[in-house]
Image (cartoon, coloured by chain):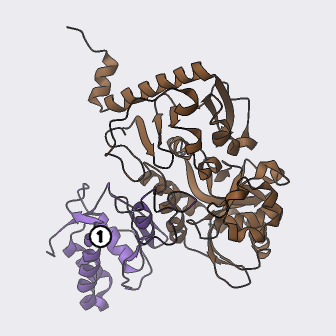
Amino acid sequence: MSTAPASTIEAARSGDHLPRSFFEDCQRAFEAAAELVGEFDQCFQLGGYGVRLRFAGTALLENMSRAFAPAASASAHVPDLTICLWDSESSGCQPPRPQWREHRSLRGEVEGYNTTRFYTVYEHESGGFTLFDRERNLANVWVPAANRVPYWIKGSPLRTVLYWWMGLHQRQLVHAAAVGNRSGGVLIAGKSGSGKSTTALACLTAGMQYAGDDYVIVDQEPTTCVYNLYNTAKVCANHLHAFPQLRDLIDNPGKLDTEKALIFLSDGAFASRIVSGFPLRSVLVPRVTGLRDTRLKKASPALALAALAPTTMFAHPRGGEQDFKRVGDLVRAIPCYLLECGTDLQQIPLTITALLESSCREPLEAQA
Amino acid sequence: MNLSTQFRVNTPNVTHETIDGETVIVNLVSGNYYSLQGTGVLIWLLVERGFSVEAVIDWLKHRYPSKASEIEPCVLSLLGQLSEEDLIVPGAVPSSTPEAPSMNESVEGRFEPQALQKFTDMQELLLLDPIHEVDSAGWPHKKSDVTV
């Protein structure tokens, strides 16, 4: 009688057997695809970590890496995280047939395939899946075909894996925008439609630094700061008139009847305003008032927590208590304000700049 | 509701934070989240620390003797809401001796009953069909004409 290897027994005991087996089969399929169509690697610094993207072929290259362009770095020879990306249409290689068809949540978590070590998510939009082995810092992202990748993923690719990875390293990917200047910056919290993107783009086009309009990374050690993740912005077509400077940068100009305008900011005059990050001075919760003037009011940390945490934790598979605690720590650490956004967009960057200047004059302890 | 009942926070399905006299509670299963202010925060903190219904009432009566007649209905009403929303469930808190919240954790000195505020916008998003009911920005962005 043969004896199972110790690692297999350990995996079975811990409930890892199914996801481990699926992950290994997918990883073998990726390596076979890379062998057939060639491997193309890109390395980035994201949230302070070296991330290596291994592409099997070039079909996914632009869709899944262009948004990271400003952080491109050749220094990740020993990456902290490696993500393997592949598709079946261009490689001719198929993943193992999933057995879970009816056992996945709306966020895509596959029942029986999510353990402490292995993360398994079905991606509803692309029909693909995202797998992560926490122990090996290795992810495998598969889609049936590159043309199944929706445009919004092109604007914020690999968000699921990066959300998991940052969370495991005490950094929090948050659903928020961030803008600033040499004095530091502000985090602009709020769910979709709250005025985040408009506020961020009003600041960008007025000359302020920009770390993101939708998803950024927050770190609280040793000091509270934010990292840029994507160099993109998404704008509703009916708001584009406010930002004529961005029109030439729209990636999907022919589809604005059904899609938001996807803008790659590193392609034009705004490239120098995209920064890798800055110290965070405040959290702002925007409200669109319909009035002309923009005003700031002191807000309770609980209001900022409610604006920032649920929309972050429920937008990501396996999101939960740790996000909530980290966002709680954030809103305790820095002052929070309600930003009543007026229709005169020029006032928004002026108001935020004035706040940042006053933050610099006051000791941080006094602000909190 | 029996006065001797002891409730506990419904972990791991529920997470919560109390900051500067306000409590935010999230039901991780339903997606609903809640806000408590005023004396509700104090009641939440007492329940979290293992006080039975009766002990919560007694503690508040001791702190607010002039409001004694209002306290029991206020506590029963709030605990009823918290229980209905599955934020607390009957059961003992692991720690042995309940310890009252310190003054700096609690809210203003006044007895100030306030209802549990409930927010359902995340639940609406969690219940969206990720293929057919999202707008062009993708899940979890809801189409404007979708009623969940």
Local packing at callout 1 (Cα closer than 10 Å; few below 14, some 14-19, many 20+) is some
Q: Mark 1 sits on what residue?
A: B85
Q: Residue at x 63, y 60 (%)?
A: A259
Viewer-proximal residue, A125 or B13? A125
Q: Position of residue A90 (x, y in %)?
A: 58, 31
Along the viewing direction, whichever of B8 and B135 lies nearer the viewer = B135
Amino acid beneath label 1: Glu
- Residue A53 sits above or below residue A363 on the image: above
Is residue A228 in sight in this rendering?
A: yes
Give me the residue at 51% from left, 35% from top.
A142
Count of all numbered marks drawn on residues in the image: 1
Q: Residue furthest right?
A: A269
Tell me, yes or no, if residue A208 can be seen here.
no
Q: Among the chains, which one is purple?
A: B
Residue A28 % position (x, y): 47, 22
Q: Residue furthest top?
A: A1
Disc 1 element: loop
Q: Classify the position of the N terminus of chain A by image quarter.
A: top left
Residue A288 location (% of width, % of height): 64, 77
**Quadrant in the picture for residue A202:** bottom right
Percent position of residue A7, x then y: 34, 20
Residue A335 lies left or right of residue A363; in this view the side is: left
Q: Residue at x 32, y 21 (%)?
A: A8
Residue at (58, 49) in percent of width and height = A150
Pinpoint the chain carrying mark 1.
B
- Nearer-the-camera pick, B24 or B135: B135
Quadrant containing the C terminus of chain A is: bottom right
Q: Is residue B85 left or right of residue A49?
A: left
Residue closest to the eye, A274 or B11: A274
Q: Colour of chain A?
A: brown
- Where residue A242 sits, quadrant-wise, is bottom right
Specify whether A103 is left or right of A334.
Answer: left
